[in-house]
Image (tube, grey):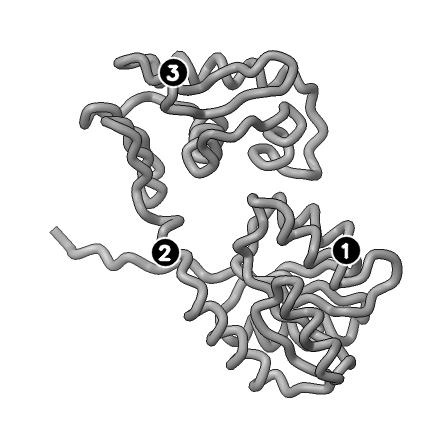
Amino acid sequence: MDEQIQVMPKHTILIVDDEDSIRDMLSIALDAAGYNVLQALNAQTAHSLVVDRNPDLILLDWMMPGTTGLELLRRLKRDEITEKIPVIMLTAKAQEANKLSGLDAGADDYIAKPFSPRELISRVKAVLRRIDRADSTSPIVVGELVLDPLEHRVSIGGVFINIGPTEYRLLQFFLTHQERVYSRDQILDYVWGGNVYLDQRTVDVHIRRLRKAISVAGYDNYVQTVRGAGYRFSVQI
């Protein structure tokens, strides 16, 4: 049998800048360096992409019309779903006070314009090395229930279970955000994506399917309905 070589997935970088020329320059440099690239020209589009695509790192311009990069950064860091995504601030504000403001708000690095593409790529690589996101590919274990992101399979007691793709994403979300209540709107945003418009009852349908899929040994009881609020995954029954 031929030995299979596992190819590591590319990191995805989101560029947020209102200047077309800057985004194009960064996109070309990052693509040449082997990264997947997403682009947004304002904070609103950027936030939808963050929710939808979960980038590995964000290059965020400080000054943009409407919501500034600094305001978006603060919003991302207030949300436990997005708080761990590393951010490099891009700005012409080179004063130390402005740099400290960005770092205090949660930025992982800061680079002043103008900068060379080579310098930026070095900063990106350094931040990605510091931010250990390897856990996202490690199996998630709750008792005998195991979700394996690499194999994209779920097992209970060593037996693989039949689970649909949406129920898989729903279970993965719950397993990585245990013991907290999420509304149907939040679940729609983080499981289906911020740009998808569905009825809240869609969540209820897939919750029922998920419970049925993991009903072995009572694991369906971990997916709990919180009346008037939403759902949570809790091992405290």
Element marked by disc 2: helix
Q: Residue 134 carries which label?
A: 2
Residue lying at the far right in this picture: please name it. 65
62 relative position to 183: left or right: right
Seen at 68% across and 33% down, the residue is 196
- CB-based contact (under 8 Å), mark 1 and mark 3: no
Residue 165 seen from this side: no
Disc 3 marks a residue whose amino acid type is Ile
214 relative position to 103: left or right: left
Q: Which of 159 and 87 is in front in this view?
A: 87
Residue 80, position in %: x, y?
56, 45
Residue 189, position in %: x, y?
64, 35
Q: Quadrant of residue 119?
A: bottom right
Q: Residue 43 carries which label?
A: 1
Q: In which quarter of the image is residue 61?
A: bottom right
Disc 1 marks a residue whose amino acid type is Ala
Look at mark 3 in the image and give the residue it sits on: 237
Q: Earlier in the sequence, mark 1 or mark 3?
A: 1
Q: How far apart are marks 2 and 1 (CA)?
A: 28 Å
Residue 86, position in %: x, y?
55, 62
